[in-house]
Image (spheres, grey):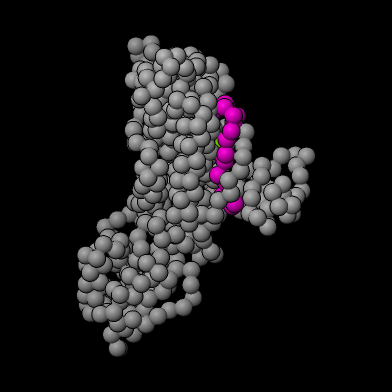
Amino acid sequence: MYWSKTFIPTLKDAPQEAESESHKLLLRAGMIRMLMAGVYSYLPLGYRALMNIQDIIRQEMQASGAAEVLLPALQPLELWQRSGRDKDIGEVMIRFTDRKGRKICLGPTHEEVITDLVRQQVSSYKQLPVVLYQIQTKFRDELRPRFGLVRGCEFIMKDAYSFDRDEQGLDKNYQLIFAAYERIFKRCGLGVLSVEADSGVMGGSVSHEFMVPAQEGEDNVLFCAVCHKGFPAKENAALNCSKCKGKLEKVSTLEVGHIFKLGTKYSSVLGANFVDAQGKMQPIIMGCYGIGVSRLISAVVEQNHDANGIIWPMEVAPYKVIILPLDITEPKIMEQANNLHARLEGAGVTVLLDDRDERAGVKFKDADLLGINLQLVIGKQFLKDGTLELKERGKEEKNAVTAEGVLEKIRAALHG
Ligand code: ATP
Ligand code: MG
């Protein structure tokens, strides 16, 4: 991709509205823009990072045995009245009446919709288990939207739901998805603490939150420096780890995932029953599993940046290589830049070519800000002896490489 053909409006300074480091960097790097408080557009680079995160989630959810669906954002309010959550969820849910007088809400989550769907299709133990997930836009009228993508009124969630005939089935799916979450967060370049948590408005018995330590977090977690176990930070809380007696430290975190053993909370009130092997009618046993997909972008940046900008983990990076021709008026330099761009694209390596007529200093600063993994510089040295300079974002060292050898070097750096 050529810089001139995409849309990367970088900013020298962070806008006043930006509160946290990830918020500032995502705005400065031209990844996102605010439409109104809590509502953001994804520009091409931010959208590419989002798609990469979604790819990782899809691969790992499918590996855990879940099938993808896409449920409607428009939901009949009546369904929420039946589950009894209409009142519990309160002002967070956005409601309106359509021109035909139907009472409608914009889905803040989908337990009701999916339970009703499965209720209509499943009647026998032979049809269970069913595990479904979606990646979809949710709407919540948050009182205090903040930190950019961290707390939005419109945001992207991955939500999964398991339907089992017994507790053992639920335990198995819970474990499978727990393990998938660990793989997802690792591939996103995140260090995450899993913490046993309150079930809150979702209800049910067991629940775990996945928390990313971040400078500007929203929650606190107690962290054992010895065995790395996380605990919820409640006020009368113990100071030592219950597992290894190590000293606990309080860390500020962002919640990126939350999973629940729901049991029969929704199936019993919505009538999602099945006939078991003995011919007895039973409510289906459920679990639900959320990931804040758009919030993950902020969490990744919170954990992966320095004073100069973002440092993308390899699998999330919008592009893997940025080519920096330092003088675009020099035909030999541009010829080599175009050539390398074509060769890298041909080899399946995502690449951005900064073909702007800007000073070298501006290009270096923006390349650091965008956080693309490898910077390939074609400057004066190339005109002298044909060498290019290869630098990894976040590392000081620069390597001189020849145009012939550069593809090998890039492959080695990418696959490390
Ligand atoms: P929170 O406690 O942060 O309000 P929640 O517990 O209500 O979140 P869940 O219903 O468990 O959230 O949603 C699943 C995931 O969606 C959360 O773990 C979080 O990562 C993400 N999420 C929730 N609310 C928002 C929001 N307003 N903006 C962006 N992401 C969100
Ligand atoms: Mg939660």
x, y percent for residue 209: 57, 41
Number of numbered discs overlaid on the protein picture:
0
Q: Quadrant of ligand 2?
A: top right
Residue at (43% x, 57% y) in the render: 29
The furthest residue to the top: 101
Answer left or right for 408 relative to 110.
Answer: left
User: In this picture, is 210 found above or below 280?
Assistant: below
Q: Position of residue 343 (x, y in %)?
A: 23, 69
Quadrant of the image occupied by residue 405: bottom left
Residue in the foreground of this view, choosing between 189 and 402: 189
In the image, residue 391 above or below residue 96: below
Q: Which residues are magenta?
A: 199-214
Which quarter of the figure has residue 11? Answer: bottom left
Left or right side of 159 for 69: left
Q: Quadrant of the N terminus?
A: bottom left
Choose between 107 and 6: the one closer to the eye.
107
171 in the magenta segment: no
Residue located at (26% from left, 57% from top):
5
Q: Which one is in front, 69 or 42?
A: 69
Looking at the picture, how far across and down is residue 132, in whole percent? 38, 33
Which residue is at the front of the view, 154 or 30? 154
Residue 233 seen in this snapshot: yes
- Judge whether residue 204 is colored magenta: yes
Name the residue at the front extreme: 278
What residue is at 30 percent from the left and 88 percent from the top? Answer: 384
Q: Is residue 285 above or below residue 375?
A: above
Residue 298 visible in the snapshot:
no
Residue 12 is situated, as x and y percent measured from the top left of the image, at: 47, 61
